[in-house]
Amino acid sequence: MEGEPIMDLIREGDDVLLYLDERRTYLVRVGEEVSFHTHKGYFQLGELVGKEFGAPIKSSLGATFYGFKPLMRDYVLKTRRRTQIMYPKDMGLLVLLTGISLGSRVVEAGTGSGALTSILANFVKPNGRVYSYEIREEFLKDAGANLRRAGLFDYVELKLKDITEGIDEECVDAVVLDLAVPWLVIPHAYRSLKGSGVLASFSPTIEQVMKTVEALREHPFADVETVELLMRRMNIGENRTRPETLMIGHTGYITTARKILRQDGT
Amino acid sequence: MEGEPIMDLIREGDDVLLYLDERRTYLVRVGEEVSFHTHKGYFQLGELVGKEFGAPIKSSLGATFYGFKPLMRDYVLKTRRRTQIMYPKDMGLLVLLTGISLGSRVVEAGTGSGALTSILANFVKPNGRVYSYEIREEFLKDAGANLRRAGLFDYVELKLKDITEGIDEECVDAVVLDLAVPWLVIPHAYRSLKGSGVLASFSPTIEQVMKTVEALREHPFADVETVELLMRRMNIGENRTRPETLMIGHTGYITTARKILRQDGT
Amino acid sequence: MEGEPIMDLIREGDDVLLYLDERRTYLVRVGEEVSFHTHKGYFQLGELVGKEFGAPIKSSLGATFYGFKPLMRDYVLKTRRRTQIMYPKDMGLLVLLTGISLGSRVVEAGTGSGALTSILANFVKPNGRVYSYEIREEFLKDAGANLRRAGLFDYVELKLKDITEGIDEECVDAVVLDLAVPWLVIPHAYRSLKGSGVLASFSPTIEQVMKTVEALREHPFADVETVELLMRRMNIGENRTRPETLMIGHTGYITTARKILRQDGT
Amino acid sequence: MEGEPIMDLIREGDDVLLYLDERRTYLVRVGEEVSFHTHKGYFQLGELVGKEFGAPIKSSLGATFYGFKPLMRDYVLKTRRRTQIMYPKDMGLLVLLTGISLGSRVVEAGTGSGALTSILANFVKPNGRVYSYEIREEFLKDAGANLRRAGLFDYVELKLKDITEGIDEECVDAVVLDLAVPWLVIPHAYRSLKGSGVLASFSPTIEQVMKTVEALREHPFADVETVELLMRRMNIGENRTRPETLMIGHTGYITTARKILRQDGT
């Protein structure tokens, strides 16, 4: 059954990404917030209601903003971060490498601000589920709020638990780790995963990677691989085309592995 | 409604990715193919039936293979390619940047071997749709076969049409281009997209990028960005940890933009 | 005749690189400057006289500075820059690719602040020479001062001339270009170079590279190559080993070519 | 005293780099070798005598070769290699970072095939010296032959000695390490270096870097830095401009440090 080609109109209660230029975007909720103020002037958010997403709106000082429909990546980039940063490039590759999609059951730790949780929930919904472990209660609160805002709370189970002490779920499709001591989770991840299920771990330092890979090799995992992604932004324009001068040189390494069964089937 | 934690058993008719080591994997269909022969010996594929995915199987020469459940990325990498190569790293970022997910309506061109089509279909299913344009009939046939094999044919409309002459669909969420002349498609993409919808174009050469960005700037698009991803594989192991000597230095640039509406609402 | 193994003692009139930490270094001239003041306290530069290079000196506030003997790269990094930046990584490769060394005769343009000029002069001395073209008089003054400070002025001929109008020197070993319009210099460079001599051009944008390579192909040059270097700094330390988060993503492309003779020997 | 602008004519006994195209170059010695045979035909090397470097020569099958004057980098790339590879990009940066130039006294280990030795010798000549340590006698023989061929033997002292047991030279300007266990050499390097002298170590693996940096921190060294260089080749040409598909993803890390003196002047 195919989705209908409907024009998206902005309604009361909708999130809108106000776009001024590449570096200045603002995530607002129409209705909840009444007016939008910036050094480029102000306008009433109610003016957006009934317009199509993508429509322009003029501020009191004549600046033009565009009202974009927020994408998952916008929520991620606008998420209040208390933790280390995984970027869209890393999340995209991680989703592809784990095969996470509609209906997947995924264990994640730690929840952090819920940025990766949102991305995962968005791909497993409506009938999959993300079980997300976190030991810091204040992070779970933030994450819960962020997931509610993005409309993804129903697909996630937030767990105030230390994943290094064990995983409750069985037969999951993937285990995704973004925490300081991933190697301590490997034995639990093995028991939690389905046969052929994928473990993925994101770590900024090479020592974390070394310990994690060593732990993976001590358990029945195969296809163990570690990669990192470098993203270069390009400046494109007549006689000024070149990679940008400053770039993010490193976010983290992604290690993946697939669970195999022992010869005796255990 | 949550998915059940079911153990996945291999059944007659299932695709299985036979894994010997990192460089030697084989995609087979149990039942359709009866026995598997390699220089490492042979075995009957029927022996896999009833085992859990991830189970080992011994060849006549004593080599151990593991029967993995194929992920979308495995289908992509096993796809017979006649065309230039977009890698999982690029596909993952493209999915994140376009916001393609459950229910999205996406226009794609060209279909090629259907590798990207499969990835897109896998994320928009079951109620979204991919409209995929291709002018070379033999490619469409390949792509159709590949999509059927991956169980994704029902979510795709393959179109033997030149997308530079126009796009039939309206109000789509995203337009994804991987063809030689993306700049010729920009006016059509603009009309086809919803307000706030995302255009993404993948191109190997900088001249293609320059022309595409120029065309985007001549139409009402905002948030125009071009990036490229470099992926480094790491060798991890005691006293031999280092990036791999050889790497893929370039696949292509990804350009994205969002449709804005003109001041007069057209 | 071999150089004597002499201990280097700091004398009146010597340049010293005061090193506090990786990010805080100061180039001073002992004698010319009397005391050194910083927010970490002050000390008399005269105290350094008679000490070995590398010796520590305590400031009034107890901070320890080390008095390093400045290397060419220190002069380069301390040079007042008015122009775009070529980094040591680029200079090092450029010297290797051009084969510039003792006795080489090299044409350079533009002089800019004289940073690359210093590096080249340092390698061609004492019996080689750098002919450096610049059209902006104030730059030539700066460059002259910088060269004098580094003790390299005698190996350079600074020329207030537009190199796009011609090169005076003949039979040079290398022509090194770091200016906005390198393609306009190619015909002159061809005439100026010895047979088998090397042209090298550094350009930030891809359009500059494209025009330069096109010009090189229209003249008798062979072995035309363009490369770029990315330098990653590493953080090394127990449980925190990783590439640095921020890196310089691009400085410029280096294009090299060797002069060949026409079949008729012209 | 300035070098004369002399045209370089090929003489009996000269090395010539025969250039067919970017991938096919051949280093020959005119006179020693009489004729040159390739699948593109043959010619008499004597025909080159008296021609200018850069001159074309036709083979019996009509292919055109050019007779280039070999640069140091050509000798390096043509050197018979038994060992791991340091590339021109690494050598260039290493020379810049160590400040090695005319008159420098440099300790090097291991000699290997003498590739880096040649580069160093070329920059320290005529009055500097490279003391090169190697424990494998057959390597020293190769290196000696390579240095003689490049005309640099007189500036090098080849030493059949284990540098991890000590360094004979004192007050040297730089110590350059390219061996498996650089951390074992740090105490000896400290004693051998002048105050403010530079140590540089090239290592392929991160474990080597970690141990070396740890050793440097346990001795009086400052300004400890580790970097790596990635070199991308570009394809330049109308509508095909792009980085090359395959690249060398890693050669090694370069660690540098400067000797400081202890507070008590030892």
Image (tube, coloured by chain):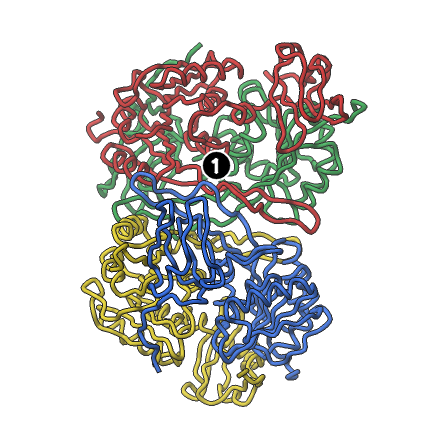
Chain colours: A yellow, B blue, C green, D red
Give whichever of C3, B4 is nearer the camera: B4
Where the C terminus of chain D falls, by quadrant? top left
Residue D34 in view, yes or no: yes
Q: Secondary structure at mark 1?
A: helix
At label 1, which amino acid type do we have?
Val
Q: Position of residue D205 (x, y in %)?
A: 35, 38
Name the quadrant containing residue B202: bottom right
Q: Is residue D205 left or right of residue B37?
A: left
Give whichever of D240, D98 is nearer the camera: D240
- Vertical placement of C232 versus A57: above or below? above
Where the N terminus of chain D falls, by quadrant? top right
- Vertical placement of C142 versus A263: above or below? above
Q: Position of residue D222 (x, y in %)?
A: 30, 36
Neighbourhood count class around disc 1 (C-alpha, 10 Å): few under 14, some 14–19, many 20 upward: many
Say which chain tag 1 marks.
C
Q: Residue at x 46, y 90 (%)?
A: A12
Q: Residue at x 22, y 30 (%)?
A: D262
Q: Residue at x 46, y 52 (%)?
A: B231
Q: Position of residue B71 (x, y in %)?
A: 44, 63
Residue B197 in view, yes or no: no
Q: Position of residue C232 (x, y in %)?
A: 43, 45
Q: Is residue C260 left or right of residue C111?
A: right
Q: Which residue is mark 1?
A: C76
Q: Residue at x 37, y 68 (%)?
A: A116
Q: Report the number of numbered marks.
A: 1
